[in-house]
Amino acid sequence: MLFLAFPAAFYLLIPVVAVELLAARRIMDITFTRKFVGVASANLVSTLAGWPLMWYIMMLLQMYVIPGGGEAYGLFTPLRAIASVTLQAAWLIPYEEELYWMVPTAAMVLMVPAFLVSVPIERIVLRFVWRQEPVPQRRHFVWRANLCSYALLIAIGCSWLVYSVVDHRRHPPRQLQTRPVEEKPDYIKQLEDWKP
């Protein structure tokens, strides 16, 4: 999942920074330039460091802590399908026919640990960029800004999931059509039986 989510995270930096800048409007004693530098740098660091760190931790939990995390749970029942997407979100088992809904769902599941990693990383970055701001105000801002930006990311994930399901229903994957095996002509059989 990291290989799908990490490049998308860079594209999503623009709307995330915009949403968090809107959340920074309440901070009056910082100029817009310092707000932008703080928000952009905090989000860049949390994307570059937080996403791989979160994925690595989740993958280790999946492989070594969660029972059967490295094996396929199967999609036979709804409970197994939910377990496959939530408990194995970091490293999805490739159920080829079901990836259309599994990838967006796993991406949204990974938003929860990503949020928990992003908040402390962004607090640390803003401690250096916004030194003059009181600590409670910085903490409150990081919490509020990340709630807003992750709400946006979950909305984008839900839209992606709905689009994937509707598109899959509208354009189901084609099944390979096999032709019936034809009887070999007599001359081929004779050539196969011929021994020099």
Image: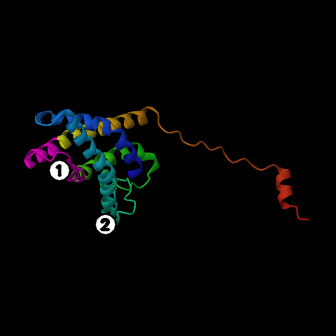
Q: Position of residue 137 (x, y in %)?
A: 9, 44
User: Which tag, 2 or 1, sits closer to the chain's start?
Assistant: 2
Which residue is farthest bottom?
A: 64
In the displayed structure, 164 sits above or below 98; it is: above
Read off the magenta span. Answer: 117-144
- Residue density around tag 2, few if under 14, some if 14–19, many if 20 or more, within 10 Å: few
Q: Position of residue 118 (x, y in %)?
A: 24, 50
Q: What residue is shown with label 2?
A: 67
On screen, residue 85 versus residue 38, left or right, reads right
Amino acid type of disc 2?
Pro
Q: Quick one: SS at disc 1?
A: helix
Which residue is farthest right?
A: 196
Give the residue drawn at x 12%, y 48%. Answer: 139
Instruction: State which mark lies toward you, 2 or 1.
Output: 1
Q: Quick one: SS at disc 2?
A: loop
On screen, residue 56 versus residue 21, left or right, reads right
Q: Position of residue 59 (x, y in %)?
A: 34, 60
Quick one: 129 or 150, which is closer to the camera?
Answer: 129
Q: What residue is shown with label 1?
A: 127
Q: Position of residue 10 (x, y in %)?
A: 36, 42
